[in-house]
Image: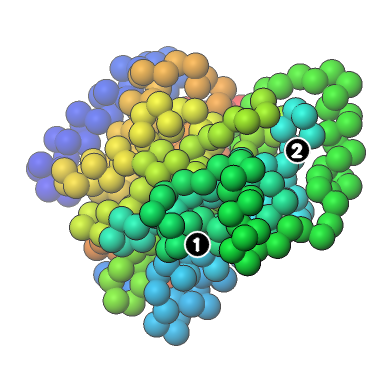
Amino acid sequence: MSRRRFLKNLSLAGAGLAINPLKSAAQPLNPDPSIKDNPLVISTWIHGMEANAGAWSVLESGGDALDAVQKGVAVTENDLNNRSVGLGGRPDRDGHVTLDACIMDHDSRCGSVAFLEDIIHPIDVARAVMEKTPHVMLVGEGAQKWALENGFSKATFEVPVPPVQKDYEEWLIKSEYKTGVNVENHDTIGMLALDASGRMAGACTTSGMAYKIRGRVGDSPIIGAGLFIDGDVGGATATGVGEAMIRTAGCASVVESMRRGASPEEACYDIVQRILKKHPGVNGMQVGFLAMNMQGEYGGYSVYNGFNYALRTKDRNEMVDAKYMRTWE
């Protein structure tokens, strides 16, 4: 490790420990793994393994990163057993499943949908918004209307799906709203890919917090909060309680840290400790970031232990445990 990076890490670690010296479990930062060859794809949580397989089917044949991330996260959207992504997700407190998604490419083109109902693949609509309109984001009834007018179809099955409807009816008895650490009620699938030509893209999609207030939108469809790509620097995506990412423009902040010379892991650490310092209300709530730079280095960091991400390269296909600030028991 260079003297410059060593001193930088000491400064970052000191800032993090000062936030909460009694409870902090911040782990030391090390230079990130560097693949130095493409392609490469990373995505959040265990469902990222299957999503990565979808993306890899594009990347291994020399395909474009944008096509790869779209195909990859669509695998998770299509899984009706997933309770935080796609139409298998849990509803808002009025019983409606609403979906958010965004996509962004190497050249900062992006598209997004929020509060979208009854469309199986919101990521496909987000890309269509990017390519067919002068806008970045469409929401609610307008987003659904535009999707139907542009070749997308409503789901033909019951939403919420029966097991989710049963859970919702049980929740209604007390109607208690709370989030938890590493509980599948606010987990996205966020994905970053670097293709063989050295171009990067990212995608993020979710059904949002379980039993949220109707109309609530989290960070996942918001460019700069839940996802950000800059082809000169790299990209970042996020997972967890979205309000924390929105308040800090989390993913854009990660990319800007990398622009100033931080490694992906250091950049993720930087925004996590900033969130803890400025927003103490995230106590007991998981927030995690995942980043990659244009050199093929990658890394992640979270508020609490338990956040992991899926990695796929020519030689590796595995889960990686992210480092964290605090221990949740």
Residue 45 seen from this side: no
Reply above or below: 11 against 117: above
Disc on res. 96 = 2
Q: Give coordinates of residue 278: x percent, y percent.
A: 36, 18
Residue 276 seen from this side: yes
Label 1 crowding class (10 Å Cα cut-off): few <14, some 14-19, many 20+?
some
Reply above or below: 287 against 154: above
Which amino acid, mark 1? Ala
Count of numbered circles in the view: 2
Q: Give coordinates of residue 99: x percent, y percent.
A: 63, 45
Q: Give coordinates of residue 321: x percent, y percent.
A: 49, 48
- In depth, the one of 158 and 175 nearer the eye is 158
**Left or right of 252 on screen, residue 223:** right
Give the residue displayed 67% in from the left and 37% down from the top.
185
Find disc 1 in the rendering and name its residue. 128
Disc on res. 138 = none
Query: Between disc 2 and disc 1, whose residue precedes?
Result: 2
In what element is the residue under mark 1? helix
Give the residue displayed 43% in from the left and 31% down from the top.
246
Q: Give coordinates of residue 314: x percent, y percent.
A: 42, 76
- In depth, the one of 43 and 143 nearer the eye is 143
- In depth, the one of 140 and 175 nearer the eye is 140
Q: Do the residues labelled 2 and 1 touch (CB within 8 Å)?
A: no
Q: Which residue is most to the bottom?
A: 61
Give the residue displayed 45% in from the left and 41% down from the top.
222
Label 2 crowding class (10 Å Cα cut-off): few <14, some 14-19, many 20+?
many
Q: Which residue is most to the left?
A: 3
Give the residue displayed 85% in from the left and 36% down from the top.
167
